[in-house]
Each structure stands twice: as C-alpha cells, then as structure tokens.
Amino acid sequence: MDAFFDNVTIFSDFLWGGTWGDQRILPVGIITIALLGTGIFTMFVLGWRPVKRLFPAFSELWAGRKGSGEGEITPWQALSTALSGQVGTGNLAGVATAITLGGPGAIFWMWVTAIFGMALAYAESSLAVRYREKHADGKYHGGPMYYIQNGLGKNWKWLAILFCIGTICSAVATGGAIQANSVTQSAVEASTSLGIDLPRWVVGAGLALLVFAVIIGGIKSIGTVAGRIVPFMAVVYILIAFVILVMNAGKIPGAFGLIFSEAFGFREAAGGFAGYVVLAAIRAGVARGLFSNEAGQGSAPIAHAAAQTKNPVKQGEIAMLGVFIDTVIICTMTALVILTVAGAYPNLDGSVVEYAWQSDALQASAITTAAFAQGIYAGGWIILAAQGLFAFTTIIGWSYYAETSATYIIGDWAARPFRFVWVAVAFLGTLVVNVDGLWRFGDVANSMMLFPNVIAILFLSGVVVKYTRDFDKHGIVPPAWYGDVARDADGKAVEAPAAKDSKGSDA
C-alpha cells in the first residue's frame, strides 16, 4: 500500500507542481496551466463581465433567499451548498501551506487565481442550469456530466462518465474520508486538552449519525442545513479574524507590502533571486487558490443546477460569488492573521521566530492555529471549532456531488442506497491512518473531474457568450434543456435566436 501511495504522490506532484520525483519537468503543474488558462480565456470572451457584475451579484444573492422557478433549493441555498464544499481546510491549511511554500507573495497569486476563477464559476454554473434535466420523479439533475452530454452531444458521454468517476473518487477521498478524519482529530485534540480520553470510533459514530440525519432527506435537507450553517460559520470566522487584525492594525500595511513585494520579487531582485521567488509564489498561490475555491473543478455546478431558477445568467453570477467569498475574503483574512500576529514560535532546533509561518516546526493548519491562539484568547479552540464545522459541511455538500454522479452512471434508483454508503464513508474516514496518501489520491481524482469540465467549458464557451449577450441586451432567458421556452425579463415567452453547440447545431 505504501508503494501505491508513493506512486500516487509522484503523479500528483506532476499534475499540481510540474515535478516528477526530483526532476522539474514544467515550471508549473499542468492543472495550473489548464485551469488558469481556461479562466483567462473565459474572462476575456465574456468581456470581464464577472468583475463588472460582482456587486450586482450580491443583490441577486439576497433576492435569491426565495426561489423564483422550478428546482429543488433556493439560489441562496445552492450557493451555501457549494460553499460548504469550497470553504474548508483550504481556507485554513491551504493558505498557510501557500505562504510556507511560496512566501507571502503567494497570496497575491491566490487573488489573481480567484479573479479568473470567477469566470470559470460563472461559465460552469450557468451551463449547469442551462443543460440540467428534469427526470421522471420531478427532480432536477445537473452539473458537468449533463452539459457535456446535452451540450456537446451523446457521443461525448464517455467524457461525462469519466467526470463522474473522478467526482466519486474525489468525494470519497477528500470530500468524505479526509474531512471526517479532520473532525475526529479536532475532537480528540479538544478532549485531550480537557483530560478526556475520547476514542476515535465514538467520534466516528456520532459524526455518522449527524451526517445521516442531514443527507437522508436529499438536496433539500442538505440545502436547508447548509443555508443556515455556512453563512453563520463564515461570518463568525471573518469577525474573529477582523478583531485580531484590529488588534494588530499597525502591521497590516507591512503585511500587504510583503505580499506585493514578494509577488514580484522586488525584495530579492538585488540578490538575483527574484525569478525563483516569483515562480515559487506563483506555483504555491495558484495551486492553493485553485484547491481552495474549486473553480473549474466542476463540483459547485452540481449544487447550482438544483437552484429554483430559470435564469442561467443570474445563477452563474451568484455562483461566482462563491469564489470571491472563499478566496478573496476568507483566505485573505486567514493570510493577514498569519502575517501580522507576532510571537515566539518555536523552530525544530530550539530557536524561536517572530511569525508562525517562519517556523519549521509548524505545518499547514498548525500555523493557522498557532497564529490565532497567539492573536486572541481561546484562538486555538476557535480554529478547532472552525475545522470541525468546515469539515462537516464539506462532508454533507460532497455527498450530493457523489450521489449525483453515481445516479448518472447507475440510475436514479441508486440515490437512497448511496446515502447509506456515504454514512459508512464518514465513519470509516475517522479511522484513516495514511491521511497524506489519501490527500494525494484525492488530488489525482480531482484531475479526473477538472479536465473533462475544462474541455466542456472551452467547447461550450460560445454558447455561454451567446445567452449572456442575449440576456444583457434583450433580457432574454434561454429555453431550458428540459422543455421550457425562451422568456423575456417579465417571464413572457419569446422567440430567441438559437444558440449553437460545438458542432454548429441548435443547442
């Protein structure tokens, strides 16, 4: 088993970092090239529309607390479900890892990734609403697998199945087992600090029961819970980080200066190391940014396809807020806390450093935990609680992604049995030993999701541009794939020019 995970690690490093063993094959990983390249292309063909429509999208989100069309959950709940998968360990461990590997300049490249990631989120989630299906049971099913099949044609179904297999593998590894392990670790650490010996299986059993209680009701239950927990935990986390930053306000300008100077290697230019520093910052920032917000990976569109709306344009705009909230807001708050809270953090050799990210004895989420613990009373407990909540909501969100993928391959009848399988995944995840190996396996599985999704976004980009322009210029909402007609802004049926698919036929 160790040999298997060693090979998985080598392949994962190539996909995400461009290295093969000790050899650097590419300056950056091919996943970075694929996602960032597609994001830049999509942003330009849309005329920077995601950036221009950022603030209006917030008002649409507020209005989306109530649905205005057929679907399973409100647009607000759809975004919350998507955020339940996006806001997680990447916001805690991912940010710290980016700074450790690429220096503070990595945060700037996380922002760049988020900006272009908004274009990906808009395209994929609007396509999910445009090409979703209404099945015999009256429920709506959508996501990359459906816009691959219905947008590109049935000859591309093999690509849709490949996406589904990748989603199931990624869900089991990183969306289920690892998150359950994280919840367990947080609970065990908390109980140990109180002098209580809490068995891991007890935590697993309790977690499994909670997961069962939420997901047995399907996407409506998941959306309801996510719609309440996710906004609450995000706001509380941001407020606590804000309080810490207010207490360290004098160091914030210096933190931003460090981010920008190291992003472009200004500080190292005199020593001739600027190129290396910038490349390291780009590699770490882009990779961790993509991991955190999941833009282009194809997971979030599955949630947005269930939204109660007939307008793919508006739901796409709401979807892109997920990337902005996850990376530009939450990840930035985490980064600033790490960069501004000074203390005496230990090194392995017994010496101390001023900031947690400079310590070689701390890694990943331990850096964030140490900074918060130093920055505010009970900060360590706050991070433990955040890890637990973030991980739990990720588990329930990814259960729906995996279920939708499984039912696409097997049939709708598999939905309820799969929910029991997912409960078992949540329990067994608490007992995982080789967590790092599972992370690496999940990274490879993610590539099985994102490459089919990126191909579909590129081939259907013309369709996205077409219905976006029709809506902006004429207020025309394109006809739904499952049989509705094109409508104007007032909901009246109209005739709209047919969009073209990748083969030139009517979409």
Image (cartoon, rainbow, N blue to C red):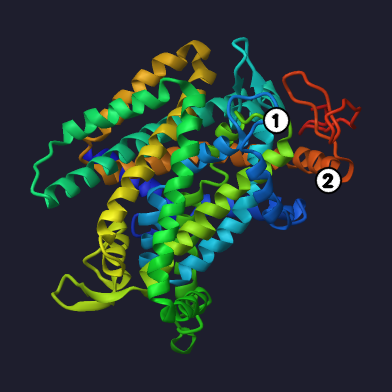
Percent x, y for residue 238? 44, 58
Taking 327 as reference, is 434 left or right?
left
Q: Amino acid at mark 2?
A: Asp
SS for dot 2: helix
Along the line of sight, the residue nearer the viewer: 236 or 203: 236
Q: In the figure, 362 relative to 161: above or below?
A: below
Taking 296 as reference, is 390 left or right?
left
Residue designated by label 1:
68
Quarter of the rendering occupied by the C terminus: top right
Q: Is there CB contact under 8 Å for labels 2 and 1? A: no
Residue designated by label 2:
472
Along the line of sight, the residue nearer the viewer: 397 or 383: 383
Percent x, y for residue 206? 24, 30
Along the line of sight, the residue nearer the viewer: 355 or 501: 355
Percent x, y for residue 435? 26, 43
Residue located at (87% from left, 27% from top): 492
Mark 2 Cα-neighbour bin, 10 Å: few <14, some 14–19, many ≥20: few
Q: Amino acid at mark 1?
A: Ser
Residue located at (72% from left, 53% from top): 53
**How many dots with numbers?**
2
Residue located at (41% from left, 32% from top): 396
Q: In the figure, 117 relative to 73: above or below?
A: below
Taking 252 as reference, is 73 left or right?
right
